[in-house]
Amino acid sequence: MEIRFPADAPAYRDSNLTVVFRALVDGEAVPCAISVEALEDHFGARSEDREGWMRAFDAGRGHIEAVAREHLQISKGTPVLLKSGHFPPGNVEDV
């Protein structure tokens, strides 16, 4: 299974408080998202700050995509929603 992450800009979705990005799995687009709670808990984003959530995503994008890749492999390429529990306790920058 080939998994790539295009350098597209992520999008904030206020209907479910996530930052959405996409993966290409064997050439097919698969939606992925990370909760703002995970961005606050592990990537230093401040609560209720859309720009902060987007900056935190950009700063942690490599790590976020690595975790998304693991879950895409496990789920055989189905959409992924990363939540706080998908990351080790604490701020990822401190690990």
Image: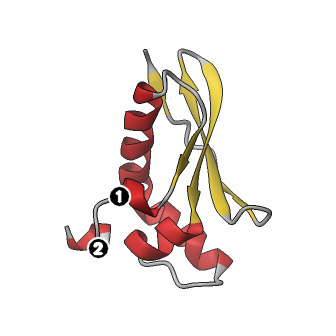
Name the residue carrying label 2. 90
- The amino acid type found where label 1 is placed reads Phe
Name the residue carrying label 1. 87
Residue drawn at 77 percent across, 66 percent down: 14
Relative height, residue 20 to residue 95 (above, below): above
Q: Quadrant of the N terminus?
A: top left
Q: Quadrant of the C terminus?
A: bottom left
Residue 43, label in figure: none
Instruction: Name the outermost residue toward the left.
Output: 95
- Front residue of 9/28: it is 28
Instruction: Name the outermost residue toward the front.
Output: 85
Percent position of residue 85, x then y? 40, 59
* Number of numbered discs: 2
Percent position of residue 61, x then y? 44, 54
Percent position of residue 83, x then y? 50, 58
- The amino acid type found where label 2 is placed reads Gly
Residue drawn at 73 percent across, 61 percent down: 16
**Quick one: SS at disc 1?**
loop
**How many neighbours does mark 1 have within 10 angstroms: few (below 14), some (14-19), or many (20 or more)?**
some
- Image-quadrant location for residue 60: bottom left
Alpha-carbon distance for marks 2 and 1? 8 Å
